[in-house]
Amino acid sequence: MEQNYQNHRRFHPLFHYILSLLVVITLVGAIVFVIKNGISLSSILILAIVVILAIMFILIRQYPLKAQDRAIRAEENLRHYVLTGTLLDSRLTIGQITALRFASDAELPELSAKAASQNLSPDDIKKQITNWKADFYRV
């Protein structure tokens, strides 16, 4: 499958739809349980367990994305260095750099300079890419 701006976002249905829905339903259920049964040891413990699960759900997503962001920054810095002999502009944010990973080698130097000088949003960067370089590894 060819990747482009319209289809580059990836979702894992089990995580993004089913698990997130179950976490929200469980959290609402625990709050309703506390309201109906009053503040008791069991209701507070149930709410605490559900809050812990909700926090874990968020962190389970955040930690791998941070690691992927670090790897993408290193890869794109190396790619930019190979192409231009200089590292990426230090004004670029991680969001801009992750958007630049979709740019072809021919577009990267000019687009990265433009992104830094005009402070383009990641979405604006992706929209300006004409020769899309697919990335099927990030979820």
Image (cartoon, helix red, strand yellow):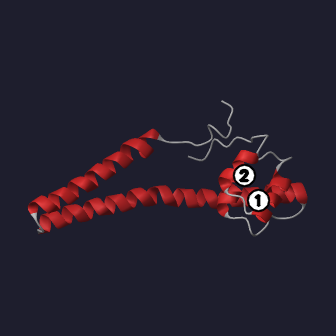
Note whether 74 is above or below 130 in the view shown: below
Q: Is residue 80 left or right of residue 99?
A: right
Q: Give left or right: position of 110 versus 3.
A: right
Q: Which mark identifies residue 115?
A: 1
In what element is the residue under mark 1?
A: helix
Task: Tell me which amino acid carries mark 1.
Answer: Ala
Looking at this view, name the residue that lies furthest to the top.
1
Tell me where residue 57 appears, x and y as whole percent. Answer: 39, 56
Q: Quadrant of residue 4?
A: top right
From the top left corner, tell me how far across and down residue 93 is, in percent. Answer: 68, 64
Can you say whether 119 is above or below 134 in the image? below
Instruction: Please report contact status of discs 1 and 2: CB closer than 8 Å, yes or no.
Output: yes
* Picture residue at 57% right of the left edge, 61% below the top: 66
**Label 2: how many Cα within 10 Å (few below 14, some 14–19, many 20+):** many
Residue appearing at x 66%, y 62% in the figure:
94
Disc number placed over residue 125 in the picture, else none: 2
The disc labelled 2 sits on which kind of residue? Ile
Query: What's the residue at 85%, 60% (across, down)?
Result: 81
Quarter of the image with the N terminus is top right
Residues under labels 1 and 2: Cα distance? 7 Å
Up/down of 91 relative to 83, above or below: below
Q: Which mark is residue 61?
A: none
